[in-house]
Amino acid sequence: MNIGILGLGTVGGGVVNVLNKNKNEIYRRSGVNIKVTYAAVRDINQARICPTGNLKLTQDPFAIVNNTDIDIVLELMGGTGLAKELVEAAIANGKHVITANKALIATHGNELLSLAKDNNVHLLFEAAVAGGIPILKSLEQGLSANKIEMVAGIINGTGNFILTEMRDKGRDFSDVLKEAQALGYAESDPTFDVEGIDAAHKLAILASIAFGCELQFDKVSTEGISKIEGEDVAFATELGYSIKHLGIAKQIDGKTQMRVHPTLIPKTHLLANVDGVMNAVLIKGNAVGPTLYYGAGAGDEATASAVIADLVDIIKDTVSDDILGWQSFETMPHQAEDDIESIFYLRLLATDKPGVLADITSIFAEHNISVEAVIQKKIDAQNNAHIAIITNSVKTVEMNTAVNEIQKNDFIQETVKIIHVETLD
Ligand code: NAP
Ligand code: HSE
């Protein structure tokens, strides 16, 4: 399969890098060797985040959409003018198109999807909504049995990053925005992020897929984050709320509502704890109830993950033997439980006498275990100390051996309790 990319910036560069680094996994899942052959850029001499040695670079994007060797076009340029012309030309030339361009799909998706249907090609856009989260595939596949009642989410990474940095570090709005731009999160016109337009594009797409209706970007009521001040954040916190910028779409009595605005949500809600560039989308289906999807909302490789998932879908649907991925499972060695490294929590009941903690820690030292935290409480009538210990990350075999040795001491009054600690990084 020959792939032509329009745009080799944050997302385009990320796609090339992820295709290289996960070549074997992607082959196993698609059954096809994917080759990116051409890429169109504005400035051929600009430094790239990906290797370009195997690519033919051109400043003429039409040379890609009109090239008969190219099977699939990835539109990763952005904008709604030239990008639209290019997507139309690619589709008219019988090529499948994948785009990350929410502005294009939200404003011209109805006509482009109908053009793709007429030309019997795919037009996919998973990366257009919530970066790396496979939210459109979840709606179309995993939740296909449901009538969707509500979609509500944090769907702009830049805005959430700004709000989080302002709240946690008291940073200045424009300073954080500059950092989001440097990290490749922001749109080429960052007012799209700040004024809620980008979130409105995404919400229009989400609502269309969730409710099975046409794209209606012009019906989304839109407010950005620029009016939120430190005082609002402080009051909201005192009242038990977090301020998050949400996109909300509901279907009530056969009518659709779509709105994007800053929203106070209870601090205890999972969405209130989605920080930085992370996005999360809550979907309520009438069979499954509420479900929540969380992940990076912007950035090169996270967005590339969604673009390549579309690529694999198209390949599986069009050229590969669908079964191949399942036939090519490898036998992988299994890690023995003893070798698994973990942090551990231990709870001990020990006679309260001098030297007990020293004896425990010297056993730890023999097994290269360090103590990260310890709490000791002497609370019972039998002169027993209740001790809780958090260790560093150690091999399970070392922990079990050390605990067996500790257990043999007379000062230990009951079986030592061990629980794994996971930082889930
Ligand atoms: P970007 O870093 O600015 O990259 C845009 C690329 O398009 C650049 O390589 C640029 O070439 C090329 N380009 C622009 N105009 C061109 C023209 N007329 N002819 C040829 N090449 C042209 O943008 P991005 O962040 O990757 O975003 C691309 C798209 O993905 C946008 O639709 C955006 O909304 C969407 N998206 C972005 C993210 C993210 O995290 N960044 C996430 C999801 C979706 P030069 O490099 O030579 O200037
Ligand atoms: N500018 C967008 C954001 C990129 O910050 O969420 C991902 O769509």
Image (cartoon, helix red, strand yellow):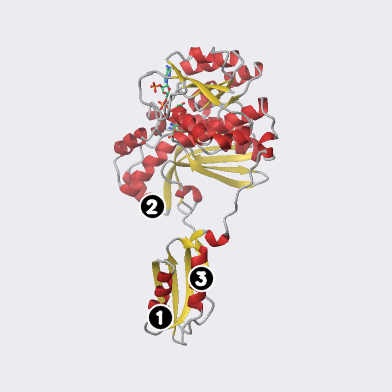
Dot 1: within a 10 Å radius of its alpha carbon, few (fewer than 14), some, or many (20 or more) residues?
A: some
Q: Where on the picture, by quarter, is residue 315?
A: top right
Earlier in the chain: of badge 3 and badge 2, it is 2
Q: Nearer the viewer, mark 1 or mark 3?
A: 3
Q: Nearer the viewer, mark 2 or mark 1?
A: 1
Question: How far from the left and from the top, in percent, is residue 394?
Answer: 46, 62
Q: Where on the picture, by quarter, is residue 121?
A: top right
Residue type at numbered disc 3 = Thr
Q: Are marks 1 and 3 in contact (CB under 8 Å)?
A: no
Dot 2: within a 10 Å radius of its alpha carbon, few (fewer than 14), some, or many (20 or more) residues?
A: some
Residue under label 1:
356
Q: Secondary structure at mark 3?
A: helix
Residue type at numbered disc 1 = Val
Residue type at numbered disc 2 = Thr
Give left or right: position of 110 versus 229.
right
Residue under label 3:
401
Give left or right: position of 50 versus 90.
left
Which residue is at 61% across, 39% downward? Answer: 138
Compared with residue 65, is residue 163 higher up or lower down, i.e. above or below? below
Question: How far from the left and from the top, in percent, is residue 329?
Answer: 65, 42
Earlier in the chain: of badge 2 and badge 1, it is 2
Q: Is residue 81 visible?
A: no
Q: Is mark 1 within 8 Å of ligand 2?
A: no
